[in-house]
Amino acid sequence: MKNLYFRAGILAAALILSMIIAIGFGSIDIETKIVAQEILNFFQGGAADSSNAMIIFDIRLPRIIFAAMSGAILALTGMLMQTVSQNYLADPYILGVSSGAGMGAVLCIVTGVAQIFAPYGVYVGAFLGAALATAIVVNIAGSGSTIKLVLIGMGISALFSAMTMLEIYGSKNEAQVRSAMFWLMGSFTGLQWQMVPIALAVLILLIGFIWLFRHELDLILLGREEAQHLGLSTERLQQMIVLVSSMAIAVIVSIAGIIGFIGLVIPHIARFIGESRHGVLLWFTSLIGALVMVWADVIARSMFKPEELPIGILTACLGAPIFIQIINRKYKN
Amino acid sequence: MNIIEVKNLSYVIDDKKILNGVNANFAEGKITAIIGANGSGKSTLMSFLSKTRRSTESVYFKGQDIDKISARDYAFQVSVLPQQHKMTADFYVEDVVVMGRFPYKKKFRDYTAEDRRIAQKAMTSVGITHLARRKLSQMSGGEIQRVLIAKALAQEPELILMDEPTNHLDVKYKIALMKTLQEYGKTVIIVLHDLSLAVQYCDEIVVMVEGGVFAQGNSKKIMQPELLEKIFGVPFVKFEHEGRTYINY
């Protein structure tokens, strides 16, 4: 147990350090020393009107904090989906939930429905899309085999992606098309402080939910029948998981677009470094998810600077080979 | 006193009668073995007793229709060891065993020190204390089987339902399991293939043939070569050795 606290402590320290270092990277590099100096100045109530301070506090800091939180949220959602489907290949991206959210969001934008319910129109659309996709996957695949679930997820993902492209193709408004396209690839560009509390609320909700039901989630992994024999009604819990994770994905997709594979890969690493009980796994998944996303965003910002690489493209490039590797290892025989 | 009574239970799937009007009584405090050839409906009957399959007004637990008993209330009194386990997670052994305490656990709380103590006791009784900090992925089928048996005991049930629990176990642990069940002193209903184990350690036998109960009664009386030959279609011998009864084919 002590050992676990130690490992979690190291991860937390690494995360905070990474976030500070990450501030320095971008289209203009700022030395870590200057970053530290500006942060110190800020805490001492010093003047914050230098151009460096503006970049740090108005542009990079909100973005990095949001990236860290969205990494944790995506990873936790992946963990929940893996548990509820008893399938370690599940992930909001692979099961088509993210595509569903994207389809819903784009539909709202191009039809103008988003403006009617502004500023929440995109969120509502994304949530309905995510919930629809999840409901279809869960109902069709049920508790079938691993491969069935993944394949059905991919089918749904393809379907919703095609619908999204149709929406974009059919749209007459060029500005809308460009914003929809860019955001479908996933991006943290231009993220502002007002998005931070929204992500924080979602993260707190997710962590709270998983913490309260940590033992029930463990039981699901014994198998549905086993859980029932221990007096747990899995159906209601399953519905709650679907609801909570659809909501979390909808918020992230609405703000930052579709970012794949974080939800798939991170829980695997977390089980390896931490352990499988949800009360423990929860913290390792959040920390590692945040850590990885902070660095993925650094790479996205600085690889082709001054241009930015959409983060969704980057995580797919890194995550897809790992996904293939997991399948290859699991089905070797 | 019967802890479970099965009254005229039938189950049809795709026009095939899996269970055909089963009537059986299971006495409280006794170990009852269910024996029969493959496809005779043993596992299906067990799935009704464990509430895995739903029945109405056919299965009674302590006089009450089990369909009217909630899953949670049933879990307080009955623990189930399924034929196969479908575990995805790589938990530590002690963490799996303590899950047997789930019905007793307060909502949102952790397992208590008392729960851990009872789990520890259950591990001792099946001889896996030394495996407590081992992960399931590092264990053999037989060892996992014993972990699940310990989990079932940690549930402290009135009734234990086991479907071929001796499947993965070698001879030593088969005997150890049957002795543990005897010492536990509560009601056990167990599907067994090993007929010598059945006659040596079980008080009662229920014999199933083609989805119905063919015979039921005291194990010493019922386990006769003539009856067994009728059921399994091969000749049997029964012999005594150093005060123990053996059945062989």
Image (cartoon, rainbow, N blue to C red):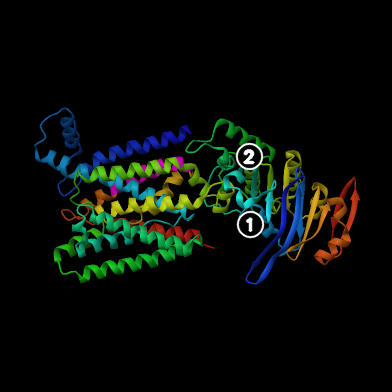
Q: Can residue B44 be seen in this view?
A: yes
Q: Quadrant of residue A55?
A: top left
Give the magenta part as a residue range.
A277-295
The amino acid type found where label 2 is placed reads Ala
For numbered disc 2, what is the local secondary structure?
helix
Residue drawn where x is 13% and y is 38% of the image: A53
Q: Tell me the chief SS of the magenta region.
A: helix
Q: In which quarter of the image is residue A155?
A: bottom left
Q: Distance between the residues labelled 1 and 2?
A: 29 Å
Which residue is nearer to you in this view: A261 or B178? Answer: B178
Q: Mark 1 points at which residue?
A: B56
Quarter of the figure with the C terminus of chain B: bottom right
Within the magenta stretch, is there residue A294?
yes
Residue drawn where x is 43% and y is 40% of the image: A211
**Chain for disc number 2:** B
Residue drawn where x is 26% and y is 59% of the image: A105
Number of dots carrying numbers: 2
Which residue is nearer to you in this view: A171 or B9? Answer: B9
Res. A261 mark: none
Q: Can residue A258 be seen in this view?
A: no
Residue A314: image x %, image y %? 29, 56
Instruction: Tell me whether marks 1 and 2 sit on the same chain.
Output: yes
For numbered disc 1, what is the local secondary structure?
loop
**Chain for disc number 1:** B
Pick whichever of labels 1 and 2 is earlier in the sequence: 1
Which residue is nearer to you in this view: B200 or B89? Answer: B200
Left or right: where does residue A82 sit relative to residue B19?
left
Res. B154 mark: 2
Residue A35: image x %, image y %? 18, 37
Kindly check if marks 1 and 2 are in contact, taking CB atoms under 8 A apart as contact: no
